[in-house]
Amino acid sequence: MRNLKSMLLGAITLAGLALPAAAQVNVKIGVLSDMSSLYADLGGAGSVAAARMAVEDFNAAAKGMRVEIVSADHQNRADVGSNIARQWFDRDGVDVIVDVPNSGVALAVNGVAREKNKVFLVSGAATSALTGEQCSPNTVHWTYDTWALANGTGKAIVQQGGDTWFFLTADYAFGHQLEADTSAVVTKLGGRVVGSVRHPLNGSDFSSFLLQAQASRAKIIGVANAGGDTINTIKQAGEFGIVRRGQSLAGLLIFISDVHGLGLEAAQGLVFTDAFYWDANDGTRAFARRMAAANRGIHPTMVHAGVYASVTHYLKAVEANKSAADGKATVDRMKALPTDDALFGKGTVRVDGRKIHDMYLYEVKKPSESKGAWDYYKLRATIPAAEAFRPLAEGKCPIAGS
Amino acid sequence: MPDIFGIPPQALFGQLLLGLINGAFYAQLSLGLAIIFGLLNIINFTHGAQYMMGAFVAWMLLNWLGLGYWWALVAAPVVVGAFGILIERTMLRHLYKLDHLYGLLLTFGIALIVQGLFRDQFGSTGLPYRIPAELRGGTDLGFMFMPNYRGWVVVVSLVVCFGTWFVIEKTKLGSYLRAATENPALVQSFGVNVPRMVMLTYGFGVGLAAFTGVLAAPIYQVSPLMGADIIIVVFAVVVIGGMGSILGSILTGFGLGIVEGLTKVFYPEASSTVIFVVMVIVLLIKPAGLFGRAR
């Protein structure tokens, strides 16, 4: 009797061991975002929802993959962000970190992911340094970057005659890079930068800076900040009659959540570059419906779309490699495979880690043109993929040279 | 006119005026804190959240009940003040005899909870609130374009601040308040209901924060984070002015607004830190604050 029992037990144990031996691939995704401050609505919980949706749609379980998602708040601090990244990689077995709005934090995480040979999929952060001098074989920069924003918006505005610029810049990695990239576009097209002022991140009163911009007499005030800072800048520019007195605002980075927060009355007429608009086609509309249901009615920003698409492509690469262990190998596979998803269509990941797709120049609708909440953009121009991003040679990315 | 430190004087006047406007917010908020600390011995860390609630009540009145700015200016302080009284009745009053730390921790915790609830409900981007029709537009002052609404803010807050100072320092009611600060038992023995006075004072301080929130709503975004951003600065203002000093908090509030405004011209990168630099210097030279008395 005892023998029978132990035999049975042994058989069960063997069977139990045999099952996972069918090479299940485990993947752990860490969504690192601003969960509580000025960028929380453009990334934050929405980015977690987008990652979750990507995993569901990929149908990972049926493909023998077990995908787990964790998330954390980096509080817009590079030290907090890189500590979480280290902890995730070293202790918690995270294979890939996604999103990371705030370029300062993203640059820190970029270094950690490379050191640990893991993967970093950037959606929220903007700085073009991530595929320039600080590019990494472990990083894919998916959604947009400062160069693309400068190229799209800067070019369009200079061509309309806006040839003198004053910058109102967020004083950290992102703002500096956005100002530098836009200045380069403006001067290249024959325009002139007459000055700039740098404000601390997450300020609330911008009137002093706006007055300085007004005194500069520049035709265009380039708003090189993001999220809550942009909203307050635009709102207060209206209050001080900046536009009525002949200057124009160029919002260099505008998210749909900002437009929603400002209201069309204050935001109308803004021209800006974006990688994604929910009301573009059936695929994007379906995604928006699901996202809105999962995220307090907030329609997806380009950051959310980028998280969804980059996670999807990452999972394809892991499936092809049959492992997520080697970060560089996974990213190499992501570069080798063409990208194809419902939100960005077909595209590629370039050797420097830059994801290449079309960008769009949008204008914010007048209140009379909008059919209701979230009906905010009209398309001014499509910037084809080949022109949308910085040419490889200009980026000075060390890994792209060889 | 010659330039002053390389800045044309017109521009400098403009910046001074803007500093004064920001100072108005600092002054009103630090005044509330000073009153509460002076009388209740509580470091009210919920003050920022209560300021934010004031702005949100204004938004809710407008969007849910169709009541505009002028109603909000009256109703929001009452509603939020009542919330404050509820906190005082149920929680704060048990802490008066304990160390400051307990009150600080409790109010800080309440602030985190309130902010978390609002963020969960309304998101971090914030909601738009328009300037009331009567105060739209602006006036050209020659050296700058002054939005009418900002002018209104400065005037109202000067009236509120100095009115409050007058009541506390120059009237009979104020003398009761001040006496109760010094020796509550003695004041009670004269037949004054001290616990009720303390409760109403807390309600007033909180109401003042909410009133400031309504004033701020059309300028800044109505956002769950607006209080958390400003409260740290306001605490620095209170410390510089001298904990519990009414006049000190008002003058320091306006003064530091101007200091901050000038920093935004000469070295904008430091504009979010300059107040703390001032705080360090003041504490080194005069540990009780500019207007405080050492106890």
Image: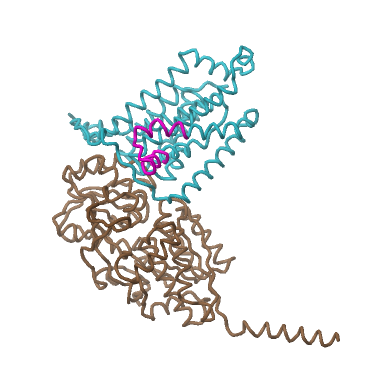
Chain colours: A brown, B cyan
Whether residue B276 is visible here, answered yes or no, is no
Looking at the rendered structure, the number of numbered marks drawn on it comes to: 0
Viewer-proximal residue among A380 and B275: A380
Give x and y (percent) for residue B282: 47, 29
Give x and y (percent) for residue A53: 46, 69
Residue found at x 45% / y 79%: A317
Residue B68 within the magenta-colored segment of the rendering: yes
Residue A95 within the magenta-colored segment of the rendering: no
Viewer-proximal residue among A23 and B120: B120
Viewer-proximal residue among B68 and A32: B68
Look at the image and tell me in which quarter the N terminus of chain B lies.
Answer: top left
Viewer-proximal residue among A269 and B248: A269
Q: Is residue A67 left or right of residue A185?
A: right
Residue ranking furthest to the right: A1
Look at the image and tell me in which quarter the C terminus of chain B lies.
Answer: top right
Give x and y (percent) for residue B46: 51, 37
Give x and y (percent) for residue A296: 44, 56
Residue ranking furthest to the left: A161
By secondary structure, the bulk of the magenta-drawn segment is best described as helix
Q: Quadrant of residue B28?
A: top left
* Residue bounds of the magenta highlight: B56-79
Image: A220 above or below B137 = below
Residue found at x 42% / y 25%: B250
Q: Is residue A325 left or right of residue A147?
A: right
Whether residue A39 is visible here, answered yes or no, is yes
